[in-house]
Each structure stands twice: as C-alpha cells, then as structure tokens.
Amino acid sequence: MILNAGTLVTMNDEREVREEVHVVVEGGEIVEIADGYASGDTAVDARSEVVIPGLVNCHTHMYALPIRGAPLAVSPRSFYEALVDIWWQIDEAFTTEDARLSAIGSCEEMLEGGVTAFCDNYSGPNTLPGALDAVADGVAQTPIRGLIAFETTARNSRDEAIEGLDENRRFIREKEGGYDRVSGHYCLHTLFTNTEEMVRECVNRAAADDRPIQIHLEEGLVDVHKSIEEYGERPVHALESMGFFDADVIAAHCVHATEEEIEVLGENDVAVAHNPYSNTNNAVGIANVEKMQEEGVTIGIGGDGWDPDMFETMRTAVGIHKLKRNDPSGFDMATALEWATIGSATVMGMEDRIGSIEEGKRGDFVTLDLGPNPILRESAPYYVVSAASQADVTRTIIDGDTVYKRGDGVHAVDAEDMKAVGAASAELWERMGLV
C-alpha cells in the first residue's frame, strides 16, 4: 500500500510534520517515508488531506453505549450516586449478547472517528464466566486493535471479585491466542470497591501473566474518603503500601491526586489515562496534568465510554486546562494530539508498534479533510485539534488496509449489525424498567 499525503503529522520524537510525501506499507509495516508522491495500484490519494497516526483511546467502557438516550429517572448529585443509581444497575442487567453487541457498536464508532486501538474495561458480573469471550468476539468482527479486561470488584462479595480475576486470567491464558488484534489485561474497578486482599491478588496474577493493571484512581472524592477511613491514608499511598505499584499500572483519572501523590506515581512509572470529557460530564474536577508532566508521568487520553469522538475529547482537554488557568494561552493544543496518539500508545505499552508514523511501525493512519483553508506545516497539529471532528475523517487505515471510508462505512459491520445493537439497547431498557 502507498499513501500519498499532502500533510503528514508524524508524532515521532521530533514531532515532525512533512509535506507532499508518500508512505509505503508492506505486510502491515511502514517500510518507507519519502518526499514526493508515488503511483501504484494500491496508492491512496490523500494529497489534499492531513494524515495523522491512528488515534488511540487508552480508557473506555464499550458497555456504556446501550445506555445512550435511555429515559433515566435518576438525577445523581455526586459521582458516587451516579455509580450506584446508574452504572451498577446497568452492570447487573447486562447479558453476554449485550456485551458482544455493545463491542461491535462501539468499535464501529471508534473506527469511523479514526480510532485504531483502544483499552476497554467491561463490567457485567452476571455474565461470568465467558464475558470477555463475548466482548472479544464483538471486537474481532471489526479490524480494530483492542486491550480488554473485566473490572474486578468486591462491592457485592469477595467471591464476585475472585470471579472477575479468574475471568481475566482465563481469557489471557486460554482464549486470547484465538484473536489477531485482541489481547487481555487486568483491571481493578477502584480501591474503594476492593480489598487489600484483592489488590495483592491482582498484582500477583498480573505479574504471572506479564500484563498491566488498569484502575480508576481518585476519580471521585469517595475514593479518597473511603481510603482514609479504611487504611488511614490517601489512595495512592495506600496502594503503594500494598505493593500495587510493583505491577505495570495504568491509573485512570487521578482527578483528586495531590502533588505528593503524583510524585509517587512518577517515582513508580505509573501511566495516567486522562479523561477530560468524562471528568467534566461527571463534574468531578480537573486532573493536575501540569504536575504529572513535571514528574515525567506518561499521559494518554480516553473517552471513558462517554464520547465516541476523540477530537471532541481532545478539545475538552484544551478547554478545561486553559480555563483552570484563566489563560487562553495556558495550554499547548498540540499536547492533546500527542496524548491521543503516541501518549496513549505508550500508556498501553504499544508505543513500539503504534502511535506515530515511522518506519518499522504498523501502518495505522487517519486521513482528514479539513476544508478549504491552507494547511501549514507549523500549525497543522493545532488545526487538527482545534477544528477536526469525526465527520472530517475520510479514511481509517490499519496495517495498510482501509477499514473505514467515508460513504462506505466500516469494513465487516453492516446495517443489520447496527440494527441488532439498537434492538439490544431497547431490550436492556425494558429489563431495567426504564420503558
């Protein structure tokens, strides 16, 4: 495959932007990036477009898709109320078919929006065991790359937590090999919904399987208050005392982490999945990414199941961090694109394969039609973040194959699949007594 690019935003170490170049992909791998355009039977014409690396969503919940548009009667006034009144009710109502179909629908959305890889955390205790098989089957129907996990929680019982850990181990050891682009990791829902025993057991299992652990960390103040009540210290310090950071950890949110806690995260090479749109929607606060950057913490960006458009998520990051400083020049817009590409790839441990356009990496690209204005090399990344949307994606390319083309849809997902996704959502609403 040959990709002719008018403007190529590489996101390599130099954050190089090149003009009028072609990229050659062989066997799914980028083998050459050269000046000028090239011809050939497999040439893709993006000479009038901006090409960026495939976007990477490092924290999402695909099972959130079916609740969109549901006539919810509750009006939570806190993050914890939202968990209890909405999300834990959804968890309990989910079936394995819901898990499969929500994965198909979410992957279709992500591919339409230029996302080529994601990290997902699924929660549906009544679908164990076998939950991750259903999720993986849905993901694998599409060409996207995915890391999936079951959220371990002891909020109902110790046995349920063990079942969650068992599900992750079973998938990794017995099922993962049957999928080309889907792999497993471990996930602890939160510290406050687990016990020290579960934390230590998760670390042991993740180490044995050489996998990362993702955790929702200090997303809401309930996490802080419960930790102080139970362990006499804030969550980061409590987890450090439990040996949690001996594992490869992805910490989602970290909204209420203090500067001292962020220093601990940096010392332990903890990666952070920043979720600005979700944090705004849940009104939990704004993460101190400035301190994280100061401490050398790797930052990626996620939609958290709320926003299928990663361009909106990037813009939300820009907006909230400018607003926090009351400074319209207080945040470098290009940083958001970095978080959504090489940053998120690094959070997921995949930076050697994806996240930037370089020789030796996989041929994952997004082509964007940004309209009639000139595209300048020095401002192209800013233009992408400030103006692009899912609607501007003309193609999503994975391993050199065009898997989404505007007007043609996503490869291997058709209207009947999406109709089934909608029907399953309606049935879920009925089971929950919403309609």
Image (spheres, helix red, strand yellow):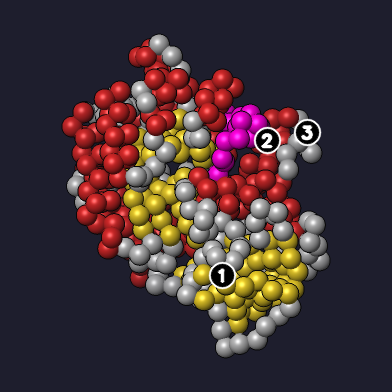
Identify the amino acid type marked 3. Answer: Asp
Q: Label 1, on which residue?
A: 30
For residue 371, what is the image quadrant? bottom right
Q: Residue at x 29, y 57 (%)?
A: 176
Q: Is residue 420 left or right of residue 128?
A: right
Question: Of all residues shown, which one is farthest toward the bottom?
Answer: 41
Q: Which residues are magenta?
A: 282-300
Q: Quadrant of the N terminus?
A: bottom right
Name the N-terminal-most of marks 3 and 2.
2
Q: Residue 314 location, x and y as percent?
A: 62, 47
Which residue corresponds to mark 3? 327
Q: Indicate the quadrant where residue 317 lies.
A: top right
Mark 1 vs 2, N-terminal side: 1
**Tally of marks:** 3
Cα–Cα gap, marks 1 and 3: 40 Å
Task: Estimate how packed mark 3 is, as few (under 14), some (14 to 19) or many (20 or more) residues with alpha carbons within 10 Å.
Answer: few
Residue type, label 2: His
Residue at disc 2, secondary structure:
helix
| Residue drawn at point x = 65 percent, y = 46 percent | 336
Secondary structure state at the residue bearing disc 3:
loop
Alpha-carbon neighbours of circle 1 within 10 Å: few (<14), some, or many (≥20)? many
Residue 294, visible in the rendered structure: yes
Q: Which residue is mark 2?
A: 321
The residue sitting at 69% across, 74% down in the picture is 34
Left or right of 393, for residue 166: left
Asked if residue 370 lies left or right of residue 205, the reply is right
Report the residue at 35% width, 14% height from top. 230
Lower position in the chain sequence, tag 1 or tag 3: 1
The percent coordinates of residue 196 (x first, y second) are 30, 23
